[in-house]
Image: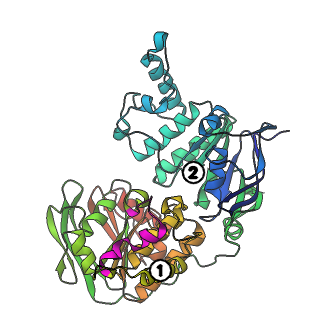
Amino acid sequence: MSHLLALKNIKKSFSGVKVLKGIDLEVDKGEIVALLGENGAGKSTLMKIIAGVFSPTEGEIYLKGEKVTILNPKHSQELKISIIHQEFNLITDMTIAENIYLGREKKKFAGIIDWKKMREDTVAVLERVGIKHLSPNTLISECSVAERQLIEIAKALSFDSEVLIMDEPTATLNAKETDTLLGLMTSLRNEGIGIIFITHRLDEVMRVADRIAVLRDGNFIGSEKIVDVTEDKMVSMMVGRDITDLFPDRIIPQEEILMTVDNLSVSDKLHNVSFSVAKGEVLGVAGLLGSGKTTLSKALFGLEKRQTGSITFLDQSIGTPKQAIDSGIALVTDDRKGEGLVLNLSVYENLLLPFYRKIGKTGVLNKSKMDTIVSKWIDALKIKVHHPSVEVGTLSGGNQQKVVLGKWLQTNPKLLILNEPTRGIDIGAKTEIYKIIKDLTEEGISIILISSEMPELLGMAHRTIVLHEGELSGELTAEEATQEKIFNYATGGGAVAK
């Protein structure tokens, strides 16, 4: 019996650099295959070949046993292959119906758009993904992140797709929204759709995948049925070694208080939030989507204007990004593409961005010093890049995140605000970042760790504060904190009994 989709010995080179070195991948009808690998392993390149963005240097692609040459993304869709990217491809000031049928609007006589038919078809495809409460006329800007993810899937299904590629679909979703999406994936599998599921969350793989396929450094490592593997086995296949200690031992923070936040309010986003951060402490910040976590990170860096209250760092009042940077505060944003990087600039230029005014005080940039700085962080953070001159936008998500981290570490911060620092990053890269966090705290640098991943907070934070609808709803020491207690605070229910 022929596979729904089969890739045979796929190779891809860019300017002589081998990125894929002979990949075999099969997906059957009604099967979820989890494609696993560290950032830079070749997953994105392989998916772009299936989606028609790239052509393979060597190798063959088969659909239902027939050899095909995928010419471009439009041709891929015509072959009933759809890819849902981690970053949404929706136009926010257009309606749901307009987005789903953009470029292929339903027409009636004389080429006039049949809006009634488009709305009816949109309702049908939205119901298929479990959305019954939104009108086809709703603007994308009015939809939540979770709703936009489901709309992306609805758009893919509107092509009558038989192969669905999902790239980190749960990365921006909370636990409840993730459950909904995983349930939808199971339903689509039961309808006979073949799904390639790219994720770094191995618990999700165990919940919904039928099989895994693993890439490492552009090589195909192997494929296993999910019933035959454990999470530890998957990690070992991905990184080529066992990772026994994901979270390093915590050091004891110093008594000196570096930052004091007193009754901080930001318009209708934060309300009378107060806390402190000690030297060498990792302060965790938890909360559901919309709780105010990102607003807090920006307010601490001077990007959000405070309505009331004060932010004091080393006896200095913080109100602007310049004051924050000059005082020794750095912010690693959760939106690396929109706020953390200039995508069309090189890795070299991005790593040096915050430091240009320091190394160029005389008006002359020291090329030798700049080269040393860039090499230092590429090596220290293990950034996978063929050359520093490569555009940062071409790197994998995890390596882009390392560039953001490296550029701020170069400013020698005393307090580092990390907003979702490991989102979309593989298990191997996570261990590296956790070790960096520990090393920084040993040097007396304080960390504010804002994360949606409770194990990350439980494993790294000395204390965790929890936000609910812009208010501080609870605070837990490392000894007190559990996932259940954090979740209860995050939902406004208060901590459960010990």
Give the residue drawn at x 47%, y 43%. Answer: 89
The region drawn magenta spans: 340-358
Q: Where residue 325 sits: x, y (%)?
A: 27, 75
Disc 1 secondary structure class: helix
Task: Give the labeled residue for mark 2.
Answer: 167
How many discs mark residues in the rendered view? Answer: 2
Q: Amino acid at mark 1?
A: Asp
Q: Where residue 403 sits: x, y (%)?
A: 47, 70
Give the residue drawn at x 46%, y 76%. Answer: 460
Q: Where residue 281 sits: x, y (%)?
A: 37, 82
The N terminus lies in quadrant: top right
Residue 473: in magenta span: no
Is 36 drawn above or below residue 383 in the view shown?
A: above
Q: Is any atom of residue 473 visible in this view?
A: no
For residue 371, the mark is 1
Q: Nearer the viewer, mark 1 or mark 2?
A: 1
